Image (spheres, grey):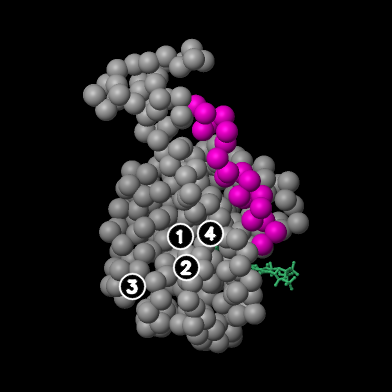
Amino acid sequence: MNPVSALYVPGDRPDRFDKAAASGADVVILDLEDAVADAAKAAALDHVTAWLAARTGGPEVQVRVNVGADHEIRAVRATGAHVGLRIPKVEAPEDLGVIASLAQGLPLTALVESARGLQNAGPIAAHPAVAALALGEADLASDLGSTAEAVLDHARIRLLVAARAAGLPAPMLSVYPRIQDLDGLRADTERGRALGLRGRTAVHPKQLPVIREVFAPDPEETAWAEAVVAALGGAADGGGGVATLPSGEMVDPAMLGRARAILAAGRP
Ligand SMILES: CC(C)(COP(=O)(O)OP(=O)(O)OC[C@H]1O[C@@H](n2cnc3c(N)ncnc32)[C@H](O)[C@@H]1OP(=O)(O)O)[C@@H](O)C(=O)NCCC(=O)NCCSC(=O)C[C@H](O)C(=O)O
Ligand SMILES: [Mg+2]
């Protein structure tokens, strides 16, 4: 199944690393950036690298490094752990040159968190070291001076288009910082899902069940996808053709890609 949930844990809270790994999140993000005060950054890097070096299994892990902190990438690389690197505040593909060479093949998730980054989302996504895009909505709102839903939706859509045009997966949604407001989390996550984003990053384990529920395979969508594949199986492989579903909907190969993606996303 594609990852749909990720949990941030501050790098200076090693007491929480194992909890995060056992939380059921598909991805654990060890944060060295904004969740860690400047005075604690060196100790956080030590905690993160020690944990990575000792780790023997568990969910996918990413490390969010600081802007310009090449030594952090070197230190993570030196652990030999196969982790992803989450690169904050990427504004242009040139920002990734040195990082990509230091990363030596570790997959990069580029965080787009500014107007300039959003303008350059296409070229950033096309950088060969970039495996995924993600939006940093809090920083973006500060840069734009707007928290309007329409502005946020616009940013989400632009990021989705940039990612898909570069052949990358649909981005996950950014964090929802109001931890106690699970109804608000659900509503906002459903809005993001309807736009086409897939999955969400969390800041607290209690947010994970809501995220998982919103991104669970939708039985109606799955039934539609199965019907499309059943109706078009032979015709599409043979180069085209139309069919009519029992519901009366006309379908042709244009719908087959989406149907197959829905079925693939629900498969373990
Ligand atoms: C937000 C928090 C500081 C809240 O911490 P706290 O008040 O201590 O939480 P609780 O008392 O409710 O904790 C209950 C139990 O859950 C465990 N817990 C809590 N949070 C985590 C976590 N993130 N990972 C693992 N485990 C967690 C506690 O240990 C308790 O367990 P137990 O004692 O066994 O009952 C805190 O949740 C936190 O630090 N969250 C992560 C914050 C973070 O990383 N932020 C940075 C990413 S978001 C961002 O940067 C924005 C982005 O860049 C943008 O621009 O948009
Ligand atoms: Mg940010």
Q: Amino acid at mark 1?
A: Leu
- Locate residue 120 relative to residue 45 in the image: left or right: left
Distance of label 4 from label 1 (alpha carbons): 18 Å
Label 1: few (<14), some (14–19) or many (≥20) C-alpha neighbours in 10 Å:
many
For the residues labelled 4 and 3, the Cα–Cα distance comes to: 22 Å
Question: Which numbered disc, 1 or 3, marks the residue that appears first in the sequence?
Answer: 3
Figure check: 42 above or below 209: below
Residue 118 visible in rendering? yes
Q: Where does label 4 land, which residue? A: 26
The picture places residue 246, in percent across and down from the top left corner, at: 49, 15
Instruction: Confirm or reject: label 2 Cβ below 8 Å from ligand 1.
Output: no
Q: Residue at x 61, y 44 (%)?
A: 214
Looking at the rendered structure, the secondary structure element under dot 2 is strand
For image coordinates 43% across by 42% down, the residue present is 264
- Image quadrant of residue 78? bottom left
- What residue did someone put label 3 on? 103
Residue 80, above or below 232: below
Q: Which mark is residue 62?
A: 2
Q: Which residue does the image show at 30% across and 53% down from the upper left?
A: 126
Q: Main secondary structure of the magenta part?
A: helix
Q: Amino acid at mark 4?
A: Asp
The magenta stretch spans residue 223: yes
Please report whichever mark, 2 or 1, sits nearer to the chain's N-terminal start. 2
Q: Marks 2 and 1: which is nearer the front? A: 2
Residue 36 in view of the camera: no
Apparent side of residue 57 relative to residue 10 in the rendered image (left or right): left
Of badges 1 and 3, nearer the viewer stands 3
Span highlighted in magenta in the image: 205-224
Residue 177 magenta-highlighted: no
